[in-house]
Image: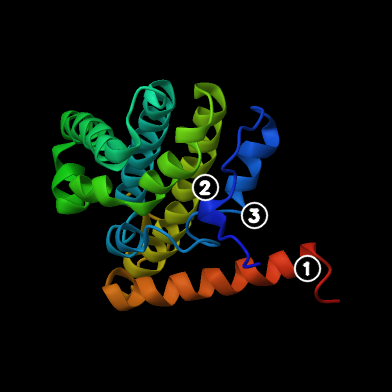
């Protein structure tokens, strides 16, 4: 029997316990464990503000779409369930896009097309299909919230490292002295790959230590 991937686990009804939430933050983190949503993670994590905005927008869409999918799951024919899920997700992405635009035009312009591309983020469609379509609204909300916060923390970690080393600032506030020479590579795409690889190495090392894999 083949082993199920983390994205397709939790397909049966689960109680809304804290475990459903916390396992999404580490054991099934969308970025560091499942390696999902890599496009926005690498593209918009060059600053803390962009990373935070993308994380919060994705979390909002995840939670809202999962609750609605769970609510209407019994009324949607199996033949059109994926199309229905995409329409639901696209509706909430539009809401999130208008909210970001209302809060900050500068961040909205910085995120560009990646904000609209939340529609095709496999984290959101994956949780809708694997969990929300088979569970009640409350467990679905908790599952989506855990996945969303896990995604936000991951992209925020990258944003902090890349902006600090690449610009010498955090949220535009200088954190080093005037003699600091920014590592320009960190705010370039190649820097995103480097930081992601380093963080994956650290996360895997910590996970092995937790499970007693290394001394």
Give the side of residue 125 with respect to residue 144, left or right: left
Badge 3 crowding class, 10 Å Cα cut-off, few under 14, some 14 to 19, many 20 or more, is some
Check if mark 3's residue and mark 2's residue have beta carbons within 8 Å: no
Mark 2, secondary structure of its residue: helix
Residue 27 numbered mark, or none: 3
Between 215 and 28, the one lying in front of the other is: 28
Mark 1, secondary structure of its residue: helix
Determine the residue positioned at 55% across, 60% down. Answer: 5
Determine the residue positioned at 57% across, 28% down. Answer: 139
Residue position for label 2: 150
Q: Where is residue 46 in the image (x, y as percent from the top left)?
A: 31, 61
Mark pair 1, 3: CA separation? 13 Å
Q: Tell me the quarter of the picture where residue 95 sits.
A: top left
Q: Is residue 159 visible?
A: yes
Mark 3, secondary structure of its residue: loop
Q: Tell me the quarter of the picture where residue 201 sits.
A: bottom right
């Amino acid at each position: 029997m083949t082993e199920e991937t983390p994205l397709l686990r939790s397909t049966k009804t689960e109680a809304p316990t804290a475990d459903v939430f916390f396992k999404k933050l580490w054991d099934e983190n969308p970025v560091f464990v499942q390696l999902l949503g890599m496009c926005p993670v690498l593209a918009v994590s060059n600053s803390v503000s962009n990373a935070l905005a993308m994380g919060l927008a994705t979390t909002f869409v995840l939670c809202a779409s999962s609750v609605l999918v769970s609510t209407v799951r019994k009324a949607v024919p199996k033949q059109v369930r994926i199309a229905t899920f995409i329409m639901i997700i696209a509706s909430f992405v539009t809401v999130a896009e208008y909210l970001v635009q209302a809060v900050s035009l500068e961040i909205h312009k910085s995120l560009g097309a990646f904000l609209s591309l939340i529609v095709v983020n496999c984290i959101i469609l994956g949780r809708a299909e694997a969990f929300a379509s088979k569970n009640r609204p409350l467990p679905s909300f908790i599952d989506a919230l855990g996945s969303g916060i896990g995604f936000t923390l991951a992209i925020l970690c990258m944003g902090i490292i890349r902006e600090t080393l690449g610009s010498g600032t955090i949220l535009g506030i200088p954190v080093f002295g005037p003699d600091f020479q920014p590592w320009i590579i960190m705010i370039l795409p190649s820097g995103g790959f480097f930081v992601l690889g380093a963080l994956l190495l650290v996360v895997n090392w910590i996970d092995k230590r937790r499970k007693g894999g290394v001394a």
